[in-house]
Amino acid sequence: MSEQLLSAQTEDDFTKARHKALFNEVQHFLNPEEATLISFSDIKNLLRPKNEVYMGMKTVPVKLIVGSEGRYQDFDNQFFPKNMHLKTRWEHIDMAHIQDISLPSISLYELGGVYFVRDGNHRVSVAKSKGIEFIDAEIVSLQSEIKLRPGDTLQKMVKQVIEYEKRVFYGETGFGDVTDYWCLDFSIPGQYDVIYNHILTHKYYINMNKSEEIGMDKAMMSWFLTVYMPVINVIDKHKIMRSFKKRTKSDLYVWVIKYWDEIKQKFGEDYSIDEMANSFLAEFGKRPLTTRIWNKITGFLLKKKIEGNDSEKNTPTISQ
């Protein structure tokens, strides 16, 4: 193939890949996050793997490469190029493939059963656009008990993390067996740690001035009956969920009790739970853009969680 024809071929290949990225963007116009390449840093901070293991060279299925360490804004979720400034480098890689020239192996992180590019984003992009099924890569594996599914968006992966956190919380505390309550659900990760800290704080207060300390199961049941359920009943009574339809009652519990704690610090311990609920609705529930405001709040929380902030910083003090 002449140099001129080769250049025309690589330009055409890039144009087709770029058009696929544009079409993918249009298809996901209403939910743009579904067409977004996943940031390795986001997933790493979300899963918090314990250690790294060098795995050496392996042949990896290209379909399992779902994200990137540093170039996740340059490619879409199918690794099609989103920006024209990628053209020159992309075409050089494509030209090497056409001429059957060997390229250096790419470098990947493995986490949760899927892969993220350390080095070689353009090579992965060209491989995906050409339908190449396997690629040689140098692998560093990060150990995690959570297994991710290729093709999932970040939001779906977040949901998997929440489901995992729920299984761990219920399994390690016996919360469901003690309370017979299996609906402690959240829409953002990290909240089961908050609940556990609430229970420990409650246990501390009810054991004050007691000669014989009560056990964890009794403390858990006491927290459930005297702290959690009264707040849930007030949420139901004041129909607070109407303003936050995409959230769970346990989401609201965490926010309402934090708000109540702040209110009592300002106005005194005699500020009742019903007064708090009315104040909470006046502050957050009766504004025209309530849902969007709440989404911003939880989006901010999720961002902080992904950035690795300790969720215990959001834990209020529960006074008895």
Image (cartoon, helix red, strand yellow):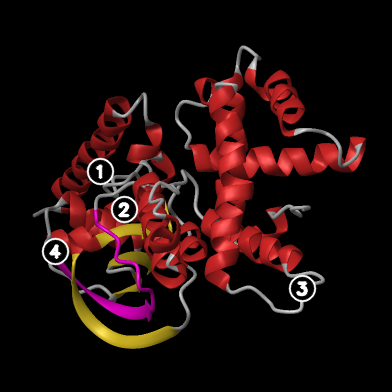
Q: Which of marks 2 and 1 is nearer the N terminus?
A: 1
**Residue under numbered circle 3:** 210
Residue 299, image x, y percentages: 56, 40
Q: Which of marks 1 and 4 is nearer the N terminus?
A: 1
Crowding near the residue tagged with mark 3, few <14, some 14–19, many ≥20 C-alpha atoms within 10 Å: few
Residue 10, image x, y percentages: 21, 48
**Residue under numbered circle 2:** 90
Amino acid on which the number 2 mark rests in the picture? Trp
Q: Which of marks 4 and 3 is nearer the N terminus?
A: 4
Residue 201, image x, y percentages: 70, 63
Q: What element carries label 1?
A: helix
Q: Which of marks 1 and 3 is in front?
A: 3
Q: How far apart are marks 2 and 1 (CA)?
A: 7 Å
**Residue under numbered circle 1:** 14
Do the CB atoms of the residues marked 3 and 2 lie less than 8 Å apart? no
Do the CB atoms of the residues marked 2 and 1 lie less than 8 Å apart? yes
Amino acid on which the number 1 mark rests in the picture? Phe
Q: Give the range drawn in magenta.
A: 134-150
Q: How far apart are marks 1 and 3 (CA)?
A: 73 Å
Q: Distance between the residues labelled 2 and 4?
A: 14 Å
Q: Nearer the viewer, residue 81 or 96?
A: 81
**Residue under numbered circle 4:** 99
